[in-house]
Amino acid sequence: MISKRSLEVLLDLAENKLSDIAPFDRDDVREIKMLHACVNELRALRGLPPIELPGRENAPRPNIRAVPRLYAVSAYETELGY
């Protein structure tokens, strides 16, 4: 059986690594998911509730209307009101 002290150290290490990692590619995203699962397992061993993984549904959406046009507008498009 793992000691309470060792469990605390492992939980701190996993949480620190999880907070420091920045996802640049799919491998990083897989590692984040794996670390998140590990943190939740360690929290369960300690009797703590799991932490929710932040999802894309809470991510801010880009404002497409705020993006300027990057191409020339023809006279025909101007007449149509584009």
Image (cartoon, helix red, strand yellow):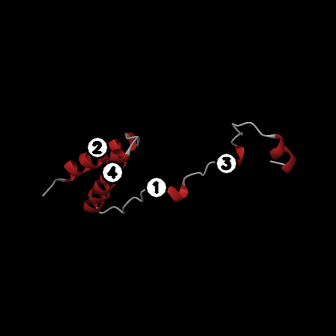
| Disc 3 residue type (three-letter) | Ile
Q: Earlier in the sequence, mark 4 or mark 2?
A: 2
Could you tell me how far apart the alpha carbons at marks 2 and 3 are, in whole angstroms? 40 Å
Identify which residue, 59 or 72, lies in the foreground: 72
* Above or below: residue 52 compared with residue 78: below
| Disc 4 residue type (three-letter) | Arg
Q: Earlier in the sequence, mark 4 or mark 3?
A: 4
| Disc 1 residue type (three-letter) | Pro
Q: Residue at x 53, y 59 (%)?
A: 57
Local crowd size for mark 4, using a 10 Å CA cut-off: few (<14), some (14–19), many (≥20):
few
Local crowd size for mark 2, using a 10 Å CA cut-off: few (<14), some (14–19), many (≥20):
few
* Rendering coords of residue 65 (x, y %): 71, 48
**Which residue lies most toward the front here?**
76
Q: Is residue 2 left or right of residue 68?
A: left
Choose mark 2 or mark 3, whichever is in front: 3
Identify which residue, 65 or 12, lies in the foreground: 65
Mark identifier at residue 64: 3
Choose mark 4 or mark 1, whichever is in front: 4
Q: Are the two marked residues, 1 and 3, in contact with CB atoms closer than 8 angstroms?
A: no
* Rendering coords of residue 26 (x, y %): 36, 47
Choose mark 4 or mark 2, whichever is in front: 4
Query: Where is mark 4, residue-wise?
Result: 30
Query: Where is mark 1, residue-wise?
Result: 54
Q: Earlier in the sequence, mark 2 or mark 3?
A: 2
Q: Secondary structure at mark 3?
A: helix
Q: Secondary structure at mark 2?
A: helix
Q: Residue at x 27, y 56 (%)?
A: 42
Could you tell me how far apart the alpha carbons at marks 4 and 2 are, in whole angstroms? 18 Å
**Which residue lies most toward the left here?**
1
Q: Residue at x 33, y 46 (%)?
A: 27
Q: Secondary structure at mark 4?
A: helix
